[in-house]
Image (spheres, grey):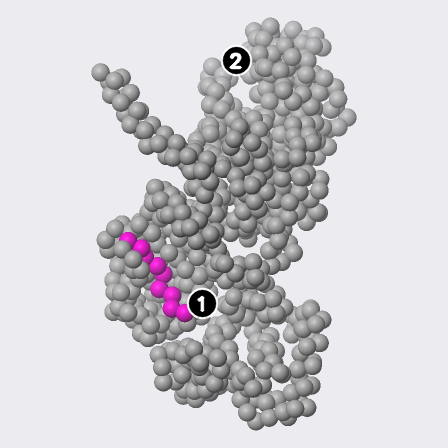
Amino acid sequence: MGWEIAPARVAFPTFAAEWDRLNSELYGGHPYFDSRFVGPLLEYFGDGSEQLCIHRTETVADGALILHPRDPGRWALFLPSQAQAGPVLLRDASMLETLFTALPGYAWTIELLALDPKFCPDWSALRKPRTVLEHALTMAVALTGSFEDYWQSRPNQLKKNMRRYRRKADEQFGSLSVSTITEGRNMEVGVTHYGELETAGWKGQTGTAVSIDNAQGRFYEKMLRDFAVSDQATIAELSVGGRIAASRLIIRNDGMWVILKTTYNESFAAVAPGRQLLYEVLQQAFSETQPGTVEFYTDATRDQAEWATTLRYLRHHQLYRNELLAALHGLSRTMLASITRQAPGTAEDKAAKFAPLAVKSYQSINELPPETIDLYEAYAHRNVEFSPGWFNNLQQTVFAGDPRVRHYVLEFDGRPSAALPLRLVHRGLVRQIEALGNYYTSLYSPILAPESTSLDLIPLLEQANRDHDSAHVMRFSPMDVDSPAYEALLTALRANGWIPFRFLCFGNWFLKVEGNWTEYLKTLTSSMRSTIKRMNKKFSADGGSYEIATDPTQVESAIQAYGDVYAVSWKKPEPYPDFIPGLIRWLAATGKLRLSIARLAGRPIAVQLWIVSHGRAHIFKVAYDESYAAYSPGTLVTALLMEHVIDRDGVQEVDFLIGEDKYKQAWMNHRRERWGIIAYNPRTLIGLALLALEAARRLIRPILNRLRGQRTKK
């Protein structure tokens, strides 16, 4: 049925039960997304413009969010300051693609604010252009094991300070005590205490303090009272010498505590009452909830992060109706940022904020620390060309001594989370950043940890741009257009103020293996089966033989045979003659080599280099001596290796890599496309000129194609 749009204040109360069902199914009943939290937000902080957007498949609601208009055509998630994380109750973000046309008027962008990456939709299927920016560094404490074990794992200085605060409080103010308010009828008293503390402090002076007499206070009192009905609300208070010194507002479910608000009496600042209360609250959480988490939903400082077991960024996601609007908005943001001397999507004080991020740059794969090598190795399960061994051979034989090679690595909290293998090159006057690869490369990708997103690529692109003195162009290809990494790179480029475009590289034919060799053979044409049978018989009768080299003991003779055949084939001489021998040696050493040689009377007449890795076979190089074409040696060697990788190696896929040649299509049963990304820097004169040329080409090309089509019809 698609989307239903209705005024949220009217529609939400009747939809609340379905909203909570979705929250339970998708996010385990996240307290922030509970209708008991969202409903009062609408009641006390909505202005009536909010729209409840419900997605239904047939009659079942399978998605929901609340938007409000900010400017003409610009919609944003309803998120008052009392909510630190935004609820988008969708399993699959691709549902949002049809929301643009369902919203009133012409919606050109949708801003989804402060999304928690642990509790947000799957973005992998979304094809609308999107920009993602970091919003706040939130923190959590994992409730596993004992509190004592957790506390012992904290930094020594934190533990020392806490002992000092407790001793000082005892000496100067008397004993400390903690009390909790959990019953609904007492929530008004607890919020009143909280408001009195906050009003007496700096928030009272700025007029932003909670008070039982203002909208904030009434919101918290009602919301906490509603949660208290199911014993899911707590107001924790720390008293020092009989006076309330700190207060924390908390809501929870069976596996999560959410710290909503914290305040303290500033006259007790010397003994850190807020920290002492946190210590007590965490002890209680460990004793009552196992396993689980305590979520803080804050913009963590370095001191706060000492309490955390995990850190992650909340993110703003901005979706666009189409690529043109994304490019125009990106260009306008960049121009505005240039005028104000501020990079798009960043704050002036960004460098001063605590950020557990570090960008490291290495000129060789061999310089990478072991943890980063492990990241490459883990990512290589997607494709063998992402592995350290592949890049090592590429650098040694193609880019040997090239000072323009870079491996940019992002470390988050000391652990590598993303890497970009790049080259910083000059094309005449144009400074270009491009994927580390060449025509040997059939697939390129950023190297991403499982939890990585486009945000992890933003600082890597920033650093590469700085190292290249503000580049004009970035180019990445060939890539898997359906991979999360492709969309992540597009998103990161937009976030950095670059204007990206997609382009087709080539078609890629591959085989999804179903059954054994005999069953596969039946799927080939009768002509192909006849050729294999007849030529095998002829080849054998004339003294032909086959060999499949797989291990290091066979390598050197196999390299010699490969070179002999390649030299008399139709192939052009290799401009980097050491690449293939180096690749063969590495593949043999790691068990990935399948190099087949057909010999006639002892002379090699056909060779094929295949790579087997992680359940896939890659047909990397083929060559044969054309003077023996009567034997169809290429067909015979392909059949031999196909039988080997299907029946002996048990691969699930055979990939013919680059190109649309007819002979490849005869063996394969599926086609996909490899695409690239080219992006321009509009903050530079050359980048802006190249951007204008690219836009003009893309505008004119369809017109010319239509004109050619019309002439052809005539």
The magenta-colored residue range is 73-81
Q: Position of residue 613 (x, y in %)?
A: 62, 35
Q: Quadrant of residue 469?
A: top right
Q: In the rendered structure, are the residues bearing label 2 and label 1 in contact, judged by CB atoms less than 8 Å apart?
A: no
Q: Is residue 76 magenta?
A: yes
Q: Quadrant of residue 60?
A: bottom left
Total numbered labels: 2
Question: Which residue is the site of mark 1?
Answer: 84
The alpha-carbon separation of the residues under discs 2 and 1 comes to: 68 Å
Q: Is residue 539 above or below residue 210?
A: above
SS under mark 2: helix
SS under mark 1: loop
Q: As rendered, which of 71 and 523 lies closer to the eye? A: 71
Q: Is residue 352 above or below residue 203?
A: above
Circle 1: residue type = Gln
Question: Which residue is the site of mark 2?
Answer: 531
Residue 562 is marked as none
Q: As rendered, which of 290 and 325 lies closer to the eye? A: 325
